[in-house]
Amino acid sequence: DLKDRKRPSELRRITSSVKYAGGKVASTSEALKYTLFHIFGKADRPEASRIALLLTASEEPPPMARSIVRYVQGLKKKKVIVIPVGLGPHASLKQIRLIEKQAPENKAYLLSGVNELEQRRDEILGYLCDLVPDIPVATIPSQIVQVTMSPQLLASPTSLHSRHMILDVVFVLEGSDRIGEANFNKSKEFMEQVIQRMDVSQGSIHISIIQYSYTVTVEFSFNETQSKRHILEK
């Protein structure tokens, strides 16, 4: 059932099937272009907050990199917040800062390498969650409140609302030679841990995963069954 929440085992299957691609050059602009036109260009939930989490480990060659601003501006127009995470000494500080300054909500994280992902995970996830407004899940209709209830029940905010996020999030993972297979697998583990902490279901959080080097590979799209077990086990 599409409305079922995905169990962690389902999400693990999908993330574990993401295989390192390799490639001499990582084209961040191609990844952003694909995210703009093919991921969020086809997303059909106008009510959802939109976030692209970009894990980048190298610098795109200058002639190709000229398009980065254009695509990040395009994502901004589609209300997509871009969070670039620079991994290690070869990540381009200039290109990451360029992405960050295109919109006030865009926030860059600069890490010494993939080994720092785990210790910064909660900080990154916390910022991501802060961007998404709370949606009241259920509100007791006023006529029902007239029924005799204990004052404690009426006063309890948790009986009226619970935290519920409507969010479309795409993980954009660099898979070039510069990051290497071992470090790519660590960035994949980070993605798994973030997804584990999300309520992935048809009516809540939707996940998309793309890997990029010179070209872009879609590992999982918004069109597929959205449940945690399905994604982590694919």
Image (tube, rainbow, N blue to C red):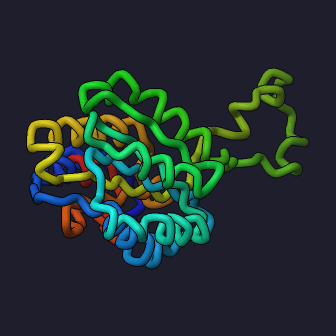
Viewer-nearest residue: 201 or 188: 188
Q: Position of residue 174 (x, y in %)?
A: 24, 52
Identify the residue at horizontal 43%, vertical 48% (top origin): 94
Is residue 144 left or right of 190 when viewed as pictured? right
The quadrant of the picture occupied by the C terminus is bottom left
Identify the residue at horizontal 76%, vertical 27% (top origin): 156
The quadrant of the picture occupied by the N terminus is bottom left
Is residue 83 left or right of 177 when viewed as pictured? right
Q: Position of residue 203 (x, y in %)?
A: 50, 59
Q: Quadrant of residue 150?
A: top right
Using the image, determine if residue 141 lies above or below residue 47: above
Identify the residue at horizontal 50%, vertical 75% (top origin): 44
Viewer-nearest residue: 186 or 158: 186
Q: Position of residue 164 (x, y in %)?
A: 58, 45
Q: Is residue 72 visible?
A: yes
Using the image, determine if residue 122 lies above or below residue 22: above
Q: Residue furthest front?
A: 62
Q: Is residue 137 visible?
A: no
Identify the residue at horizontal 15%, vertical 40% (top origin): 185
Viewer-nearest residue: 92 or 102: 92
Q: How many marks?
A: 0
Is residue 31 left or right of 99 when viewed as pictured? left
Using the image, determine if residue 206 lies above or below residue 92: below
